[in-house]
Amino acid sequence: MTTIDVLRPHAEDAFAAELAALAEQDERPRPERWRLSPWAVATYLLGGELPDGTVITPKYVGPRRIVEVAVSTLATDRALLLLGVPGTAKTWVSEHLAAAVSGDSTLLVQGTAGTSEEAVRYGWNYAELLSNGPSRAALVPSPVLRAMADGKIVRVEELTRIPADVQDSLITILSEKTLPVPELGWENQAVRGFNLIATANDRDRGVNELSSALRRRFNTVVLPLPASLDEEVEIVARRVDQLGRALELPELPGGTQEIRRVVTVFRELRDGVTADGRTKVKSPTGTLSTAEAISVVTNGLALAAHFGDGVLRARDVASGLVGAVVRDPVTDQVVWREYVEGVLRERDGWKDFYRAARELSG
Ligand SMILES: Nc1ncnc2c1ncn2[C@@H]1O[C@H](COP(=O)(O)OP(=O)(O)OP(=O)(O)O)[C@@H](O)[C@H]1O
Ligand SMILES: [Mg+2]
């Protein structure tokens, strides 16, 4: 399968040209088995221009220091924990870090309440086990075990959703850098270059807290919400543009204005106050993350492209917007209506937006 045909290429494929240019021009020392130097990894994430003029697009928009701390942690013997409210790019950053450091972002354990020890350690191929007994050939390595053997980065998503006893099987791996396989009288010792990036949500609190023993093995980096309206608009615009191209949606006029309005509404509801600081508003129960703003606008683009008149209009984004804001049909509906009537109604240049929002809020 070519990368052009897959719905969502891995970061290392989508940005293969940038990674290759960085690797070629990067003259700084690289830790063992790293594809790039820490400096080049940070440049890949934050964007920049190389000596030969190659432009590296920013993947993460936010404080430079956060990325520097994250990258340098990966070069130490401590693992990296990315913490933050939903939609702050934890998964996104971890995928790009793995792609830049190891050239491979696919070693992934998705944490859920049902994540078993086999997913973190190893399992067995039962056919092989029954016919030939326990052997290396019958062992089914987890992504963690494969990363240890190959000296790569493994990612653990939503660490706090994993049951505590399964989480604790990471302690030996992170502190001793080894994974014993008692059935074979063997241990798998991690090769240089191995490290682990975990993500966890601090808002939708995971069912299981991180044990303090495990937490001590991590350097924690908290990813903040975008600091300003402009920053958030830039993040949404960039991502919508990429997604739109992947979905083969045409570029429509009106996009910039609607993105700015969606992000403004999101921020005001999240912050509990209007952008000018004058009017207090109630916050709905949903998280209204940047990620949700991205999907509201992308859905709006699809609506406009297939059923609209060639311009992205307020009504194209409004239904997605209301869906994101009104999560609880009772309380959120009240909050939304108050906001529409109390804030949007009087706002200069927002008449079309107000009308579209009003139509949908019944
Ligand atoms: N600061 C940012 N810079 C660049 N992209 C961002 C930023 N914040 C959010 N995004 C975008 O938001 C989208 C969602 O991010 P992601 O899924 O990584 O969030 P998350 O923190 O893992 O959320 P969750 O807690 O729900 O898993 C990504 O497509 C990413 O491009
Ligand atoms: Mg995530």
Image (tube, rainbow, N blue to C red):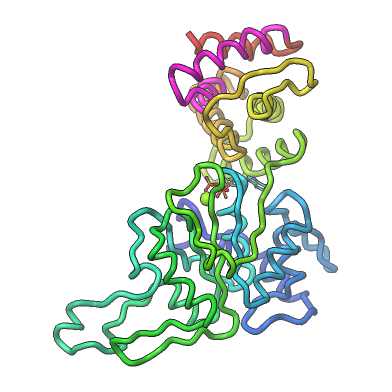
Viewer-proximal residue, 1 or 318?
318
Q: Is residue 235 left or right of residue 182?
A: right
User: Can you see residue 69?
Assistant: yes
Q: How many numbered badges does the structure rendering display?
A: 0
User: Can you see residue 3?
Assistant: no
Where does residue 310 sit, x and y in percent of width and height? Answer: 59, 23
Where's the N terminus, which quadrant?
bottom left
Where does residue 136 sit, x and y in percent of width and height? Answer: 31, 88
Residue 293 appears in which quarter of the rendering?
top right
Which residue of the protein is positioned furthest toward the right in this rendering?
51
Q: Residue at x 53, y 75 (%)?
A: 174
Name the dominant secondary structure of the magenta segment.
Answer: helix
Question: Looking at the image, is 338 positioned above or below residue 256?
Answer: above
Where does residue 145 sit, x and y in percent of width and height? Answer: 43, 77
In the rendered image, residue 97 lying in the magenta stretch gets the answer no
Where does residue 122 sit, x and y in percent of width and height? Answer: 35, 75
Residue 100 appears in which quarter of the rendering?
bottom right
Q: Is residue 352 left or right of residue 40?
A: left
In the rendered image, residue 322 lying in the magenta stretch gets the answer yes
Viewer-proximal residue, 107 or 162?
162
Tell me where the magenta segment starts and ends, as one range: 317-346
Q: Residue at x 42, y 57 (%)?
A: 111
